Image (spheres, helix red, strand yellow):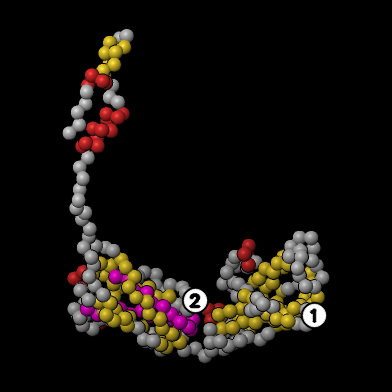
Amino acid sequence: MIFINMKKIILKTRRGILFRSSLLFMLLFLSGCVKEYDTVVDPPEINFRVTYVGVADSVKYVPGDSVTFIRLGLTNPSSINSVHVNIYSSENKKLNNVPVLLKDNGDLTVGDYIQGDSIYSGKFPLSQFYPNGNYRVEYFVEDKYSTTTPVAVKMFTYDNAQSNLPPVVSNLLAPDSAAIGSQAVVLLLTLDVYDPNGLNDIELVYYNSFIPPNGTPALANPIQMFDDGLILEHGDSVAGDGTYSRLVILPSTGVTTGIYRWEFQARDRGKKQSNVIIHNIKIY
């Protein structure tokens, strides 16, 4: 217990007696009133685990039946509020606008066969216009405390059943010469790319640079070009229009002069290569 001598906090002034509580007194008083607790209540641990992750390893588009079935096995369903997935294409673009719910209710319309078997099921249609390549399914579980946890990832390959034709590159715009100056020089390269299977089928647009005087391949090869609309970073003005761009920066020092050979090309997701456009540029 704390004893306070009140005589020590009586102050006399010309107008009378004033009482003032010192800061020390208040701190001592408050510290004597604080109650300590030795029990902390934590939410109970969620007790479920994944027993099965189901998506076919490869999916091929079939006209009239493009649905892909997605399943997840879990223990202790009483601790689970909901299950959903997100699906990403080979371009790492999310295909579903809203989460795809997986159910364990025996409803065949959502893809579930047996109610209460702890296998949560759903389905998702894949378009013929989606690009070929490796796709990703990310699984999430929301528990009864409304906490959502990522629990699994499954990859599969998708074949849109279209005949794979190679891309075509054309309309290269690049300078024929450039002079090294007292400051860095920026060159803009642009290239039109077409793919019979759609622009989504383009995997990479690039060029290889060969250095004078002996045509030695540059260490940076292949040098990527971009169709992302990032004009300051890559020189591309419109994203997704099939025109690929690249900014080339020539520093004021350290550049080998002479005639460079640049070879421009594109590759699709089926690994088919386009035609090659060769361009020579004189750096002096």
Among the 4 quarters of the image, the one containing residue 44: bottom left
Among the 4 quarters of the image, the one containing residue 29: top left
Q: Nearer the viewer, residue 54 or 211?
A: 211
Residue 245 visible to an observer of this rendering: yes
* Position of the C terminus by quadrant: bottom right
How far from the left and from the top, in percent, is residue 43? Answer: 22, 60
Q: Amino acid at mark 1?
A: Pro
How far from the left and from the top, in percent, is residue 236? Answer: 63, 68
Q: Is residue 119 magenta?
A: yes
Residue range of the region highlighted in magenta in the rendering: 118-141
Residue that badge 2 annotates: 91
Which residue is located at x 67 percent, y 68 percent? 247
Residue 171 visible to an observer of this rendering: no
In the structure shown, which secondary structural element does the residue marked by tag 1 occupy?
Answer: loop
Which residue is located at x 21 percent, y 36 percent? 32
Residue that badge 1 annotates: 213
Q: CA distance from mark 1 to mark 2?
A: 39 Å
